[in-house]
Amino acid sequence: MKSYLEPKFIIQRDQERCIQCKVCITQCSVDTHYYDTEDDEVKSYPDTCVGCQRCVVFCPTQALTVKKNPNEYRENYNWSPEVIEDITKQAETGGILLTGMGNDRDYPIYWDHLLLNASQVTNPSIDPLREPMELATYLGRKPDRVEIDPDTLSLKTKLDPLVKLDIPIMFAAMSYGAVSINVQESLARAATEMGTLWDTGEGGLHSKLYKYGSHTVVQVASGRFGVHPDYLNAARVVEIKIGQGAKPGIGGHLPGEKVSDQVSLTRMIPQGTDALSPAPQHDIYSIEDLAQLIYALKEATNYTKPISVKIAAVHNSAAIASGMVRAGADIIVLDGFRGATGATPKIIRNNVGIPIELALASVDNRLRQEGLRNQASIVISGGIRNSGDVAKAIALGADAIYIGTAALVALGCHLCQQCHTGKCSWGICTTDPTLTKRINPDIGARRLANLLHSWSLELKDMLGGMGINAIESLRGNRLHLRGVGLTDTELRILGVRMAGE
Ligand code: SF4
Ligand code: SF4
């Protein structure tokens, strides 16, 4: 069947600059560039181009420009070019439209409607270059009160296991298979260097990464891939994954082509078979079931690790979170709809879930009202773009933040949304051995550690500006936030006052 779809991108090659080196041919993972032997010239076939910009970055003479196809459809607000293209694709394939990364719709980004405070005359600001600033955060269940032995002045209260993060930013769950082993190694090494955690996602833990266990969150998801006692005990935190922001309510699918021998060994599934994680966690159909699984995991790890429970941010997140804490979760992870994923139905990604900012504010509020806030840490993820978002999230009530897409961008990702194809030209979302080599773990770990280092310096600047010398003092302190361009209802849910008040 002839496709009625037009190329999404056009490629312009400046023949004056092009030296026919063929680098663009070798760098492209979707065969957009080719060598025409008759004309003795490198040419392009734009139909396959996904706009990943890899060839543009690596062209030694800056001869290439990749642009959105300027061909215009007749203007129609309802029937936008994307709607027409999606219907055309479905008419040609008869299948569900898959995509990668997170929701890219223009729903409000509340971080951009919140502004931080700064000290002026009273409560003077603190200069982070001259005075110590503390970014350390402890994740896990904290007691309602502590008892001190008056004779020895030692702590009598038995504390639940806590995890110290040197910075309140962790790397989000990205499974082996969805991303390459070199990406995971880069994440693990950067997390170790920066005193924070990375997360295996639901794909198990490759044997070469066990040495980073003390900086690792391991997931127990609905597919139970790679879950065994050594895996659980290697980790610093065990995370039960119930939902994911990019695809709330549905399971996961790693195509068989991405299940290589190493992925199959790590996930404990046959090589080349599709790894399908069921939509529900079949262990969990009630809060009591969740309590049972949390208990089982605590027993399996001898009560040495906090147990985290991750859900997608949805309409009634606050009530769900309250139940999760009562079930024994030490950490609650809320994943918003801008959270990325390797593959998801586009219709789910674009239409399901709620903004993470509103979910965070309502969960923090509910747990405070119920006197439960100290019993679990709150971690959020889903589209955190910079240290400003991090500071605002902490002021809204988060203890720490997971970053996924930002970490991938640090590794080279250009958000082409083709992760589900396994042909990531940047060597990130792939198990292809040749593409995998495009991420060098030495360089990857350096880039990721640099990113975290930059953000931690900026966080210290912002804290100092507010006259605060510890991130703990910012947590849930909404007096340091003001809203702009928000309705009364939005301000009420966020728990912040209007700028000027
Ligand atoms: S990489 Fe640049 S210089 Fe080399 S063949 Fe392609 S367009 Fe020409
Ligand atoms: S990870 Fe790779 S495939 Fe996915 S959006 Fe980024 S560049 Fe594209």
Image: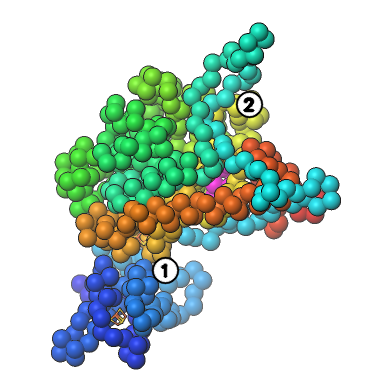
Tell me if mark 2 has few (under 14), some (14-19) or many (20+) residues whose alpha carbon lies within 10 angstroms of its own: few
Horizontal and vertical percent for residue 128?
A: 67, 49
Q: Quadrant of ligand 1?
A: bottom left
Confirm or reject: label 2 Cβ below 8 Å from ligand 2: no
Q: Which residue is mark 1?
A: 82
Is residue 342 in the magenta section? no
- Residue visible at 61% across and 36% down? 364
- Residue visible at 38% across and 28% down? 284
Query: Which numbered disc, 2 or 1, marks the residue that appears first in the sequence?
Result: 1
Instruction: Identify the image quadrant of residue 430.
Output: bottom left
- Is residue 376 shown to the viewer in this render? yes
- Report, in whole angstroms, how far the alpha carbon at label 2 lies from the one at label 1: 45 Å
- Residue visible at 30% across and 64% down? 425
User: SS of the residue at dot 2?
Assistant: loop
* 36 with respect to 162 (left or right): left
User: SS of the residue at dot 1?
Assistant: helix
Horizontal and vertical percent for residue 281?
A: 35, 33
Q: Amino acid at mark 2?
A: Glu
Q: Which residue is mark 2?
A: 370
Horizontal and vertical percent for residue 149?
A: 63, 10
* 207 with respect to 393 (left or right): left
Q: Residue furthest front?
A: 130
Which one is in front, 305 or 38?
Answer: 305
* 431 with respect to 475 (left or right): left
Q: Residue furthest right?
A: 121
Q: Amino acid at mark 1?
A: Glu
The residue stretch that appears in magenta: 355-362
